[in-house]
Amino acid sequence: MKIGIFIAYHPNSELSNQGLGRLLRELTTGLLTVDGIEVVLLCPSWLEKEAKELLSDAQEPHFTILSPKRVPALITLWNKFSKKDKKKDKKIGVKTKIVRFVKRMIGQVIHSVEVVLVNALSVRNPFLFLLAVFSFAILGLLFLPFYVVGIAIALLALSPLLLARVPVLTRIYSNFCQLYGMIKARMPFRHHPPLRWMVYNQIFKNETKHMVSIANSRKDIDVWFSPTVFWPEFSSINAPTVQVFPDMLISEFPSAFALELSGSVVVYKQASKAIRSGKYFISYSDAVGYGALSRRFDIAHNNIYVIPHAPINLSKFIQIIGTLDDGMARNKFATNLIHGYRSTKWVENQYLSTFDFSNTHFIFYASQFRPNKNIMNLVKAFEIVLRKRYKYIKLIMTGNWEHAPEVLEYVRKKRLTHDVITAYNTSDEVLAALYAKAQLSVNPTLYEGGFPFTFAEGMSVGTPSLMSRIPQVTDVIKGELAETMLFNPYSIDDIAAKIEFGLDHRDELLRLQTPLYNEMRNRTWSDVAKDHIKVFEKVIEVERR
């Protein structure tokens, strides 16, 4: 059987440091262990390099990667000149606000012209792209007076002393601001999306259209598989198709996602369209498959297949064998990995840049920052443990503060910036090291697609877990063990109490959780792959009738 895997993430998406990336790698590796199976990964041109790195262990001829041949010119330029690791968290001053105001003014004036050029800027051919840029520059000259006025106003605005000393300039500037506000309120295109989003969206549409064309040209592929439900275009492939429904978080937390994550409503609409245009689905738990998917989207139970994960083992990334004391050697290696991350990622942080993690006690949560991840309650519970239970530990997480600004504000307000640390965009080796050095892995999630990876990831390197009492967890953890290690994620006091208990009874937790982990280890990713293959065979048989 030849299986095609379809992924179509937008430009600047990251695979390697996300749960989906690790899942994709484990599943693909598992599929390739089954005799007679070949895998073809179809991805956008801008993800080809990262996909090759992520799946570097998969060898031809049984595994190949397909993508459109040429990366769109604008994406190439953006990746080359965009500045990474920008300094965040700076207070926005008056000057910056004024500059942004002027930029918005100029942008509104030329927006209608930019819309015309969206399709031209999204082309893949470099010659046509340069032609579009040249045309844009010519049109820009026509609006030169607006730029001149904007620059003049910016220069005046950036000189507070001059404005203070020349009252007439202050009045001119104030009157102009009022006039601009009136004009802006009456602009018919003021609600249009920004040019960057429009161009990227058009590039994405062109790319996925090209990808579907590539898929339809491959008559040798028996079934196409999408590891998520983000792409309605997937159902345009003229072959049996199966999609994974991992979860629909925005439908479970609509207000939180709408307020905190821009574009989430658009994503929900796209996912809904993909589900309604699809037919066969895989989910990771009964609660999600027969619950959210069947209930919300009216998918027949016969077309839903529940396939639980296998545990992810991180021990191979920090394993040390053959020394006089392998445990001590592994601990030292893990410390060195964290210090290596510190020297590259935290070098501009005056406190962390020289901090010694050799004997530092901390609890760890490996997750992106999303509304369902319950980050605020974890931070508040940690504060109780630190300041009221007098447990001198730190909290390390792997999310990006950009996705949880209200939590960052709370951390600053409570003077926890030296105690709550984020290690964003970590490698597998550093992730394993953080798990191994942690006292506890704490997962306060409110909702997951299946049993959370964090339990097995931590136990694979000898770190016990505390987890939320949610259906996806209680389906697996029951009885006395559930009472010992699970907490109510909505209760800050309960989370804090369980963390305190876990710190005081770490060895006991590890002993109680080891039998469950050993049982989970009996299920391998080869078993998961075989379950997928059984689903594919059923779908192919039904579709050929």
Image (tube, rainbow, N blue to C red):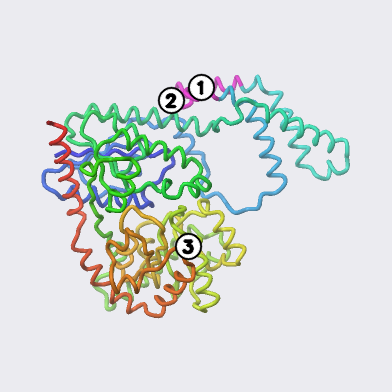
- Look at the numbered disc 1 and give the secondary structure of its residue: helix
Name the residue carrying label 2: 123
At mark 2, the secondary structure is loop
**Magenta part of the protein: which range?**
115-139
Residue 138 is inside the magenta segment: yes
Q: Position of residue 50 (x, y in %)?
A: 35, 44
User: Where is 63 relative to 510, above or below?
Assistant: above
| Image location (x, y in percent) of residue 323 | 27, 75
Amino acid type of the residue tagged 3 in the rendering: Arg
Instruction: Calculate the distance from the C-alpha at mark 1 to the C-alpha at mark 3.
Output: 43 Å
| Circle 1 residue | 132
Residue flagged by tag 1: what amino acid is it? Answer: Ala
243, 84: nearer the viewer: 243
Q: Dot 3 surroundings within 10 Å: few (below 14), some, or many (20 or more)?
A: many
Instruction: Locate residue 515: give its quadrant.
Output: bottom left
The type of residue carrying mark 2 is Val
The local crowd at label 1, few if under 14, some if 14 to 19, many if 20 or more residues have their Cα within 10 Å, is some
Question: The C terminus lies in which quarter of the figure?
Answer: top left
Residue 250 appears at what percent x and percent y?
A: 43, 46
The disc at residue 89 is: none
Task: Identify the residue position indicated by label 3 in the image.
Answer: 342
Q: What is the distance, in whole Å, between disc 3 and disc 2 at their CAs?
A: 40 Å
Q: Earlier in the sequence, mark 1 or mark 2?
A: 2
> So how many labels did they put on this image?
3
The Cα atoms of the two marked residues, 1 and 2, are separated by 9 Å
Circles 3 and 2, Cβ within 8 Å, touching? The answer is: no
Residue shown at the point (14%, 49%) measured from the top left: 34
Marks 1/3 in contact by CB < 8 Å: the verdict is no
Of the pair 511 and 245, the residue shown nearer to us: 245
User: Residue drawn 80% across and 36% down?
Assistant: 174
Q: Residues within 10 Å of mark 2 (few under 14, many from 20)?
A: many
